[in-house]
Amino acid sequence: MEHRLEAELALSGTLPATVPTAELVPRIAADAIARTIGKRGEGRLAEWTLDGETLRVVFESTGPRPHQALLAFARRLGEELGKSAKVGVRSFTATRYRTEFPLDAAPTAPITLPIPHHLTVDGMLATLSLLSLSEEGLRDNWMDRAVALVQEKVRRQTYQGKEQYWSLIAASAPRETTFRADPTEEMLKRLWVRSGPTKGKWYLGPTAAHLLRTMERIAVEEVLRPLGFQEVVQPHHDSFDILLRTGHMEGLPGEFYYVAEPKTRDPAAWERFTDLVKITRQVPEAELARMVTPPTAVSCYAQCPTTYWWLSGRTLSLESLPLKIFDRAAVSNRYESGGRHGLERVDEFHRIEPVYLGAPDDLIALREKLLERYRHVFDEILELEWRTAWVTPFYMQQSGKVGVEDAEARVKGTIDFEAYLPYRGPRETSEWLEFQNLSIVGDKYTKAFSIKAQKGELWSGCTGIGLERWLTAFLSQKGLDAPGWPSGFRRYAGDLPADVRFL
Amino acid sequence: MEHRLEAELALSGTLPATVPTAELVPRIAADAIARTIGKRGEGRLAEWTLDGETLRVVFESTGPRPHQALLAFARRLGEELGKSAKVGVRSFTATRYRTEFPLDAAPTAPITLPIPHHLTVDGMLATLSLLSLSEEGLRDNWMDRAVALVQEKVRRQTYQGKEQYWSLIAASAPRETTFRADPTEEMLKRLWVRSGPTKGKWYLGPTAAHLLRTMERIAVEEVLRPLGFQEVVQPHHDSFDILLRTGHMEGLPGEFYYVAEPKTRDPAAWERFTDLVKITRQVPEAELARMVTPPTAVSCYAQCPTTYWWLSGRTLSLESLPLKIFDRAAVSNRYESGGRHGLERVDEFHRIEPVYLGAPDDLIALREKLLERYRHVFDEILELEWRTAWVTPFYMQQSGKVGVEDAEARVKGTIDFEAYLPYRGPRETSEWLEFQNLSIVGDKYTKAFSIKAQKGELWSGCTGIGLERWLTAFLSQKGLDAPGWPSGFRRYAGDLPADVRFL
């Protein structure tokens, strides 16, 4: 059979001779198989031996894997032996759990797993054995997840190096640009910004801050308020639990800034640390490591996960649907490492995150309205040269759905706005800046957080507005001098601050 | 003599007999003493012996301590021996460095230091010996800092348990209040807020967010804009270096949320972590600990330190003075532990931080104007019952200046606004809520960050506006129902959002 589970159950004592094991063990096993596999496949107790307090069993099956049968068997066995002989099942382990499953392709490189296992591949058929799998691993379906992981890794080998999915939707007319400099370099020269005290973060002086806030006002007044979005204020730490539910924890752990807490707030416990600081005027690293916890959370990476958490377990009344809210309180962090550049790719940025939940049709209609408002802003206020494209969001890449072209994908998925940055070179060959996106994610997050609608299906989506990106796109095309700016933007910006004069 | 420094210098070789050590060592020592102690005290080379490659010296002094003399001696000795005998001074250590100094009081409990030492106290005279003090410790004045630390600890023992300095300045008339509930409890009942996914942080739904933003608009439009404050946008991570310079690192390490970075962003290096997450649906703590750095920074605690960093090393033109700026981008964190309560004492809050730099007289005048604007807001818009008091800010407590009553302290220092919270009990006996403060700190921070004015003295100060505190003070006195709110506030608040309806 496809699946074979060899397990050892530790009993709490040896069985008295009065227990009819030869009848009891096969009967309970057959019952457990009937209740967990039933008509969906086949299963059997292939072998069993009792040796003192150790009961060894081997379950085999086709169709569903047999670990649920083992769990049911162990529970019922414990109940029956408890009653008849005052003996319980103390614990159990799968010494070897073997399964066969198909792959999408033959692997091109070795596949590793972080738990004890043995994996062989014959063409496109894999045979995986997990070794010493604990009761927790059995209860928690580690085998199913390990199989999915092997399949994902093979799929990823296949797609490695291929282009990310990208398909042009629309483009503005080209615009003449006279400014060709890197706007961050220009802002640095004018002392509008200072490169921050920690990696990839910036201090914006009055003029730069005024321009960033102008972008914020444009987004709120031209896009969000007209469409009925309401503001919320969300925490800027994301819990691990939330990121496990959204999938960010497995997708992007190398891009998070982690947050650690003091082990205590008691000044007496910190006395050695503070004394060392006072004497050496340095941070004593070893002492600090002793006084803080391991990371317990993450500084906001994306805002929408915490908004889904806010609504978790709740049922939204029809009168509140589609729900349209936005947060601009949480400051976002991404560890960009080698990728950081100026204000356009930073470790800290300010984003308005609109999130919407509603019936699929309502969200599709809302998307059209959002696109219309964005185009209005980019065409008539910022007067940008832009284009839009369908792209593959990370969670679809993660699950291997790369390159999907069907109608389903054109409903769920992400649209990117990209802006031409003259300083990077000719518009035809240079890389444009992704400066706005818009997604509908279906029921992925509403399911993950158990959010329901009073009636009907509940989908969700989001459309993060990165203010540094809007600002970079704008300044790259229009330059830093107000007279060259479009009148719509000048009206919003009003008088510029005097900024600070240094000698 | 008061101070005695026993040191060992390791030479790079034995000295040839041609070197006139009996003349050379006392001469260089006398010269070093003359140049570092000179007329400010007395010093002498009390003993010296040369034993192979080890030169032992003992410097004694009164007045200035003799470690600068030792440093000068070692440098000059190396130069002369290098020329005459090709022998250098490889390193040196103070085996024992003893000093005597007065205390403000006799200690009431043992005093500890985190570096090797021996401390005895006779009445109010202390004798401290540091043992095995490194070259770095000598260069870096660890003895001076250790002495200051011992004095501070004794002073703190004296003040322990005494009331914090607090002196009433002014108070509004009492106001009749009909609302007596804890506003956070009421907001929880109405689902306006949800207690966040991590400690002491809150998610504000549309109504609560609208009220918080209303407070923000009142502060900006009624206090900051009329007085010419300009907005900046600052990073929300504070570097250790900045916090060392402001003194926060030694003052409050148990109240910070620390930030740690990934050791790498490379997904291949994170594969074991991500695989474990995919199989176990838990965060593998040991693997995570292996992949992140120790803490490298702190999530914003106070905003003004980073603003001082922004201006560090710069000279402000007279036309920009007094400089008046504010930040509202950084979200503030404090690890409150047992102290947290509702929205009024939280681990995360939203604060506008106005900072001002200028001539002392200009700042004193600005303080009057700020007080006038605050009183206008609290009396005529929020209609609060409040009082103001002089209080001792942490940095003055840290340096032991507790209870200062002189004129100097009434120029530099902090004024707190406190609001009566009816739910806590009678106004005469219950604890009021500190909901606004205002400080002038003199040249403490401008000196620490080398910020200068084109001409004259440059002082600074700040007056953090905690929006959660304003909101709690207001709702505690006025309740959650709009009809009971003062008309000035209602005008600012406009129509309230519909909020989200749950089933």
Image (cartoon, coloured by chain):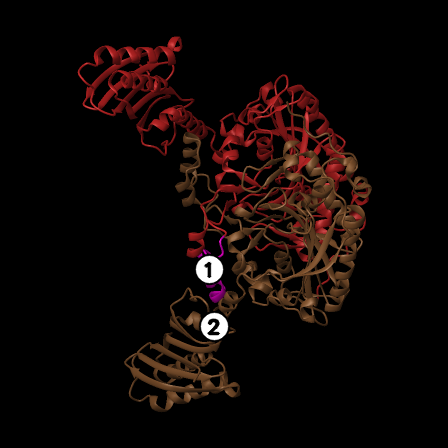
Chain colours: A brown, B red
Residue B217 % position (x, y): 74, 41
The Cα–Cα distance between marks 2 and 1, rounded to whole angstroms, is 21 Å
Judge whether A242 appears above or below B169 on screen: below
Q: Chain of mark 2?
A: A
Circles 2, 1 touching at the beta carbon (< 8 Å): no
**Is A365 on the left or on the right of B94, as rendered?**
right
Q: Return the residue found at the far bottom.
A: A23
Nearest the eye: B202 or B12:
B12
Q: Amino acid at mark 1?
A: Glu
Residue at the limit of the structure toward the top, as seen here: B39
Circle 2 packing at 10 Å, graded few (<14), some (14-19), many (20+), is some
Above or below residue B344? Residue B266 is below
Q: Is disc 1 surrounded by few (<14), some (14 to 19) or many (20+) residues within 10 Å?
A: some
Quarter location, residue A487: top right
Q: Position of residue B261 (x, y in %)?
A: 49, 47
Q: Position of residue B253 (x, y in %)?
A: 48, 39
Per the rendered image, the range of residues in magenta is: B266-285
Q: Is residue B158 left or right of residue B304?
A: left
The quadrant of the rendering that contains the C terminus of chain B is bottom right
Q: Is there any visible trace of residue B93 in the rendered image?
A: no
A345 or B205: nearer the viewer: A345
Q: Which residue is label 2 attached to? A: A106
Q: Residue at x 29, y 85 (%)?
A: A16
The chain under label 1 reads B
Q: Can you identify the residue that label 1 sits on?
A: B271
